[in-house]
Amino acid sequence: MMQEARIIELPKIKDPRGNLTFLEGENHIPFPIVRTFWIYDVPGGETRGGHAYKNTQEFIIALSGSFDVVLHDGKQERRFSLNRSYYGLYIPAGTWRHMENFSTNALALVIASTPYSEKEYIRNFEEFNAGSLDTLTAQATQLSEEKEDKIPFSKSTLHDCRKIELPINHREKGNITVIENAITLPFSARRVYYLYDVPGGETRGGHAHKELHQLIIAAGGSFDVVLNDGTSEKTVTLNRPYQALKIVPGIWRELNNFSSGATCLVLASETYRESDYIRDFDEFLNKKNES
């Protein structure tokens, strides 16, 4: 298994208004996105992890700051330093891992192939080291998809968009917020992307979607999301990694007022399709007025 752990470089779309990196399940990473969580507020000198999964595959990204991921397959140890948001570390099932050397304000984004189950964990290294990977691993569990009810494009309003308080697992060694498809998340995420290096005064977004559902999180710093349903407009400020804004199809949205070092994390219900975007506001208004 150890030789299968590897760094995967992700697309980096450079833009003078701020860079964008994205990944799609079973495309840029070799498994579907089922669970997404992020670890933040890690005190200096603390270690996180210290476990193996029986079936779960992971992909770990340093969304901000830096940290090391130490892997062990029962025979040898390897260390990977993560410090850029446009690549990540793929970890196969049956690999012991922990994270250490967190820099100030580091944020670890982890994408996992299975829903949470305590039975998936091996938390004792001696037990892990004594076991056979063939007996530890089995066929990975799959989560049935439960798509959110579709709202007609012309009927969606600002009332369909709402701010959601996400769960916080408070830990002395750093907090964790977890999102699972069709459980915490009101749709199944197929794409994750994030905006970073946004210069002061710049605006990002400026589009609507025909079918895509989104969950937007300020993983670092703060920014405003301006929503327009064709009739009314409102601004939502995001500034905590445990708060998210749910946006349904048929809503025009723009992001502005980025603080220094802000990172905008987005979980999306569909893979990228340019045909799903409406990038002209007048076209958006015309479509909203269709019967």
Image (cartoon, rainbow, N blue to C red):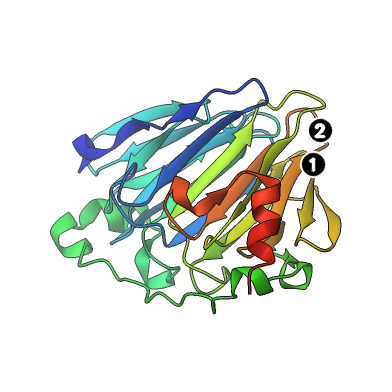
In the figure, is residue 61 to the left or right of 92? right
As shown in the figure, which amino acid type bears the numbered disc 1? Ser
For label 1, the crowd category at 10 Å Cα-Cα, with few meaning under 14, some 14 to 19 and many 20 or more, is: many
Q: Residue 80 in the image: x percent, y percent?
A: 40, 28
Quarter in which the N terminus is drawn: top left
In the figure, is residue 74 to the left or right of 71? left
Mark 1 lies on a secondary structure that is: loop
Q: Height in image: 249 above or below 183?
A: above
From where the camera sits, is residue 141 visible? yes
Q: Residue, x 40% and y 74% (percent of image)?
A: 145
For label 2, the crowd category at 10 Å Cα-Cα, with few meaning under 14, some 14 to 19 and many 20 or more, is: some
Quarter in which the C terminus is drawn: bottom right
Q: Residue 281 in the image: x percent, y percent?
A: 70, 47
Q: Height in image: 113 above or below 139?
A: above
From where the camera sits, is residue 100 visible? no
Mark 2 lies on a secondary structure that is: loop
- Between 166 and 158, the residue placed more toward the observer is 158
Q: Earlier in the sequence, mark 1 or mark 2?
A: 1
Q: Residue furthest left?
A: 134
As shown in the figure, which amino acid type bears the numbered disc 2? Ser
In the figure, is residue 88 to the left or right of 218? left
Q: Residue 270 in the image: x percent, y percent?
A: 45, 57
Q: Residue, x 45% and y 68% (percent of image)?
A: 116
Label number found at residue 266: none
Task: Give the residue number, with chain letter if any, for mark 1.
Answer: 222
Label number found at residue 259: 2
Tell whether label 2 touches label 1 (CB within 8 Å): yes
Q: Residue furthest top?
A: 16
- Between 250 and 50, the residue placed more toward the observer is 250
Q: Residue 108 in the image: x percent, y percent?
A: 56, 41
Q: Residue, x 59% and y 75% (percent of image)?
A: 151
